[in-house]
């Protein structure tokens, strides 16, 4: 794998992009309430991105399966929607929904990418537990990431925690390297398979990864809707998605999408 190791300067530039991502996600979490449309969330994200002098990563992205490029700045995926949900003024958030918001920007030539799932109003205990488990396995990745660690060890811990909670990891989508492009090497799965074991990733100082577990309440299988973008669970049960852009550093891991003033180093 041709994995690019980033300099300290490049990591700081990615952190700047990540700060924009974090600020936008924080605002969208604040305004995501019953009665708000997902189109409204996209409009706010678009305005904030422009004000920051950044460019939204997702808008205009082409897919070999879709007839048209992705039309929005953010992906807004509700309940059984796993990822790539398209915002619309016709889609109104309701009490009890869970909403996954995925967002990324390019700023000064470098990219940041993150996602969060939030409850809309009061949500059920089952949905809250799904969110908590998914967030926890992202935290596992952040805590365990350090130079010299095999990614398969972290992926196994993420998968085991998820499955022991009675949920399933989505296997059709994985994390990725990130830097000057949104998707770079390596592929970063949240589970262990033969492909990973055959070409394990040895974490090295300077690697920058977008780690993004997606967890289903039911089976791991997914399907794509007729719009050729929106991915949903095959069994119709809910899904959650959390993501951070992280850097492998000498002391462990730095979260580059933690926010404008936050810096997290784990040892």
Image: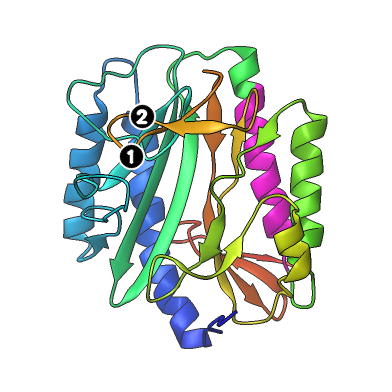
**Alpha carbons under labels 1 and 2: distance apart:** 7 Å
Q: Residue at x 38, y 68 (%)?
A: 111
Q: Which mark is residue 229?
A: 1
Location of residue 129 in the rendering, given as x and y in whole percent from the top left corner: 67, 24
> For numbered disc 2, what is the local secondary structure?
loop
Q: Is residue 97 left or right of residue 64?
A: right
Query: Does 142 lie within the magenta span?
Result: yes
Question: Quadrant location of the C terminus?
Answer: bottom right
The answer to whether 48 is drawn above or below residue 98 in the figure is: below
Mark 1, residues whose alpha carbon is within 10 Å: few (<14), some, or many (≥20)? many
Main SS, magenta residues: helix
Q: Residue at x 79, y 77 (%)?
A: 148
Q: Residue at x 30, y 67 (%)?
A: 106
Q: Is residue 109 left or right of residue 158?
A: left
Q: Residue at x 39, y 35 (%)?
A: 29
User: Circle 2 sits on which residue?
Assistant: 225
> For numbered disc 1, what is the local secondary structure?
loop
Colouring rule applied to residues: rainbow
Foreground of the two, 120 or 56:
56
Location of residue 208 in the rendering, given as x and y in whole percent from the top left corner: 55, 72
Q: Is residue 83 left or right of residue 74?
A: right
Location of residue 19 in the rendering, given as x and y in whole percent from the top left corner: 40, 61
In the image, which residues are magenta?
A: 129-145
């Amino acid at each position: 794998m041709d994995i690019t190791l980033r300099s300290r300067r490049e990591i700081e530039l990615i952190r700047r992009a990540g700060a924009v991502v974090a600020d936008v996600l924080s605002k969208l979490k604040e305004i995501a309430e019953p009665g708000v449309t997902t189109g409204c969330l996209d409009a706010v994200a678009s305005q904030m991105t422009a004000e920051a002098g950044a460019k939204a990563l997702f808008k205009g992205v082409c897919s070999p399966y879709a007839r048209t490029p992705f039309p929005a700045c953010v992906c807004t995926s509700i309940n059984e929607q796993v990822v790539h949900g398209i915002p619309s003024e016709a889609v109104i958030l309701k009490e009890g929904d869970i909403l996954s918001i995925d967002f990324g920007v390019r700023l000064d030539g470098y990219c940041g990418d993150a996602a969060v799932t939030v409850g809309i109003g009061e949500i059920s205990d089952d949905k809250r537990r799904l969110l908590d488990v998914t967030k926890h396995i992202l935290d596992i990745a952040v805590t365990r990431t350090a130079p010299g660690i095999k990614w398969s060890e972290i992926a196994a811990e993420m998968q085991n925690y998820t499955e022991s909670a009675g949920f399933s990891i989505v296997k059709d989508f994985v994390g990725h390297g990130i830097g000057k492009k949104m998707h770079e090497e390596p592929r970063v799965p949240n589970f262990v398979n033969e492909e990973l074991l055959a070409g394990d990733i040895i974490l090295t100082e300077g690697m920058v990864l977008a780690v993004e577990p997606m967890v289903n309440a039911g089976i791991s299988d997914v399907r794509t809707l007729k719009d050729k973008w929106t991915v949903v669970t095959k069994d119709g049960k809910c899904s959650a998605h959390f993501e951070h852009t992280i850097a492998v550093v000498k002391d462990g891991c730095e979260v580059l999408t933690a926010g404008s003033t936050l810096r997290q180093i784990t040892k």
